[in-house]
């Protein structure tokens, strides 16, 4: 009898060991993503600072209020004012049409955090060193492990363990405090400065928004739009995507105010951030304010409210319907911001800028989000870096203004400075240009060599004079495109136009000469197919880039 029991126990142990072995990656994911989780308190009211009860200066004599709305991972084809649109986006369209639409607008790069640094400083990574997107501890290792478990037809993802171990903690991978942000610049003009939502430029010490010029910050501390088991949420897991696996495993639902302990947001993030933005507008209606509203949507994990999910109608696959519902929530947010400004009588003296941090990612497995352009987030093809750029300022910028002059995220900071009447920081090289002369019809943007630059590790790109050169040093590949004739980058002219390649390569060499080294190294090099989504298997003839981060 005892022998039989021992045999049964042995069989259980063997079976358990075998099960653990076959699921070891899921077990590693479970253990790693549950380490060092801070406690989260229940939701509580945000004690927003209250501005003066009465204005000391008439509204028309004050500098304009400035609202900067940044969307996350939005595809250029997701808005009906720019593309086909999955669903109508009437509020965003109306905002765009009442001011200037820049039809050739670019993000700072193909990922979120460096774009945000360029937006706030007007400076390239060659000056700031902020080149790679900070990722939570162990994310690179976990994502690489699952990515290389798939046979997707691409080379393997490379994880540099030594680089990861030499990097600072996730919370300390941030924008250095000696960089001058929009918020710091506006404070010299008496603005009350508020950040709400995603930051991604370092959450501790000198990198925290409160130490980068923001009087107040309601900071996104986690990864979920709502708890996964919330009765009001509809989730869409993207099982084939390694990044999605990590986000769901690691994600929680929390925020903080001005460095407080973490607490639960008061609802679905897009709506909660908007609710709190309206309170900020009301509290500061009698003094100039700068509101930086940085949404988390439509970034994965894909989550929508049941109300939005039901409202958008039938879509297949399920994740496309959830994605569409997330767009609906962002469009509603923009409409509510505009309505509040109108209700407070502030709309005529408020400049609103709306953009996205980069193009839509291929890893969500939805093929047309950046149509008609090639490429995705994590590439520097047009699909990865084409973004909306709308500037609304009633009475200053004529409604229905269309501008095809190329602009980029580095141009936002000097544009806001000009609107506020603020001086650019002394002794600091600003790479961006003021967009207002183009928007107001009073002048043109004059950029040195007519050049805009992008970079990530050994992947360098320049657009100048309608030509675009891409050099992927990781695989020794060069692409040259004539964007005037070929805006969707289908025909590579590198072999046919060696003189143009040499001319643009000289601009790249000049741009990188004496460049500041990255603040911390890249830890992964990931192959990203240009014409396939993350759900598809690439064929031998499919082109790809190697994205360092």
Image (cartoon, helix red, strand yellow):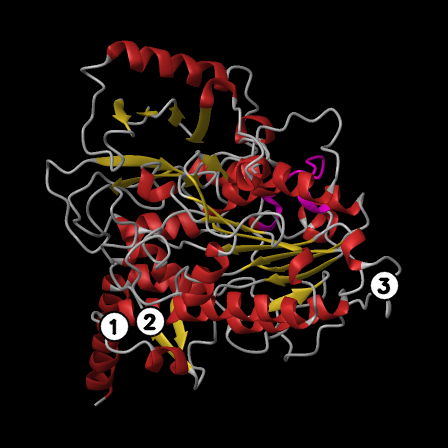
Residue at image point 59% right, 78% down: 266
Kindly tell me whether residue 423 is visible in this rendering: yes
CB under 8 Å between callouts 3 and 1? no
Boundaries of the magenta span? 171-183
Q: Say what secondary structure mark 3 lies in.
A: loop
Q: Is 259 displayed left or right of 356 in the figure? A: right
* Residue beneath disc 1: 318
Q: Is residue 499 above or below residue 311?
A: above
The picture quadrant where one finds residue 414 is top right
Return the x and y of residue 260 as percentages of the image width and height: 72, 65
Q: Is 544 displayed left or right of 286 in the figure? A: left
Q: Is residue 516 above or below residue 107?
A: above
First along the sequence among labels 3 and 2: 3
Return the x and y of residue 315 as percentages of the image width and height: 23, 72
Q: Say what secondary structure mark 1 lies in.
A: helix
First along the sequence among labels 3 and 1: 3
Q: Nearer the viewer, mark 3 or mark 2?
A: 3
Most common secondary structure along the magenta stretch: loop
CB under 8 Å between callouts 3 and 2? no
Label 2, residues with CA under 10 Å away: few <14, some 14-19, many ≥20: many
In the rendered view of the protein, which quadrant contains the N terminus? Answer: bottom left
Residue at image point 74% right, 48% down: 213
Q: Which mark is residue 322?
A: 2
Return the x and y of residue 33 as percentages of the image width and height: 45, 62
Kindly tell me whether residue 456 is visible in this rendering: no
Find the residue positioned furthest to the left. Answer: 540
Residue 494 on the magenta span: no
Residue at image point 73% right, 32% down: 425
* Residue beneath disc 3: 55
Q: Is residue 168 above or below residue 75?
A: above
Comparing 37 with 365, the one in front is: 365
């Amino acid at each position: 009898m005892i022998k039989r029991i021992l045999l049964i126990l042995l069989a259980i142990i063997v079976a358990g060991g075998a099960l653990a072995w076959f699921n070891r990656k899921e077990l590693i994911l479970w253990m790693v993503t549950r380490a060092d989780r801070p406690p989260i308190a229940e939701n509580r009211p945000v004690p927003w600072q209250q501005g003066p009860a009465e204005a000391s200066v008439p509204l028309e004599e004050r500098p304009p209020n400035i609202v900067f709305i940044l969307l996350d991972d939005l595809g250029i084809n997701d808005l009906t004012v720019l593309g086909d649109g999955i669903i109508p986006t009437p509020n965003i369209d109306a905002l765009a049409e009442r001011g200037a639409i820049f039809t050739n607008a670019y993000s700072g790069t193909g990922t979120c955090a460096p774009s945000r640094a360029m937006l706030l400083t007007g400076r390239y990574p060659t000056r700031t060193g902020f080149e790679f997107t900070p990722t939570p501890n162990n994310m690179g290792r976990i994502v690489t492990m699952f990515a290389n478990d798939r046979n997707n037809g691409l080379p393997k993802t490379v994880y540099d363990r030594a680089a990861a171990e030499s990097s600072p903690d996730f919370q300390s991978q941030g924008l250095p405090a000696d960089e001058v942000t929009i918020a710091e610049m506006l404070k010299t003009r008496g603005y009350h400065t508020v950040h709400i939502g995603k930051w991604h430029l370092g959450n501790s010490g000198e990198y925290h928004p409160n130490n980068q010029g923001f009087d107040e910050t309601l900071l996104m501390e986690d990864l979920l739009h709502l708890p996964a088991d919330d009765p009001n949420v509809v989730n869409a897991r993207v099982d084939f995507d390694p990044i999605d696996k990590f986000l769901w495993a690691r994600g929680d639902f929390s925020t903080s105010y001005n460095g407080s302990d973490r607490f639960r947001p008061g609802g679905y993030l897009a709506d909660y951030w908007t609710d709190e933005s309206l309170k900020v507008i009301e509290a500061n209606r009698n003094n100039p304010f700068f509101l930086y509203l940085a949404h988390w949507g439509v970034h994965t994990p894909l989550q929508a409210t049941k109300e939005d999910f039901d409202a958008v109608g039938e879509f297949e696959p399920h994740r496309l319907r959830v994605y569409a519902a997330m767009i609906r929530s962002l469009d509603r947010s923009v409409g509510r911001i505009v309505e509040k400004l109108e209700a407070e009588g502030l709309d005529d003296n408020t400049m609103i800028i709306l953009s996205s941090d980069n193009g839509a990612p291929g890893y969500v497995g939805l093929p047309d989000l950046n149509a008609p352009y090639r490429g995705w987030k994590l590439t520097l093809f047009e699909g990865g870096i084409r973004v909306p750029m709308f500037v609304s300022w009633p009475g200053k910028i004529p409604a229905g203004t269309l501008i095809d002059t190329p602009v980029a995220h580095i141009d936002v900071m000097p544009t806001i400075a000009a609107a506020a009447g603020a001086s650019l920081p002394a002794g600091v090289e600003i790479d961006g240009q003021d967009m207002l002369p183009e928007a107001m019809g009073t002048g043109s943007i004059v950029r040195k060599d007519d050049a805009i630059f992008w970079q990530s590790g050994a992947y360098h790109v320049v657009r100048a004079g309608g030509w675009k050169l891409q050099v992927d040093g990781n695989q020794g590949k060069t692409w040259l495109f004539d964007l005037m004739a070929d805006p969707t980058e289908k025909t590579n002219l590198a072999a046919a136009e060696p003189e143009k390649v040499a001319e643009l390569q000289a601009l790249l060499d000049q741009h990188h000469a004496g460049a500041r080294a990255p603040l911390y190294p890249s830890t992964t090099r990931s192959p990203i197919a240009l014409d396939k989504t993350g759900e598809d298997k690439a064929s031998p003839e499919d082109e790809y880039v190697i994205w360092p981060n």
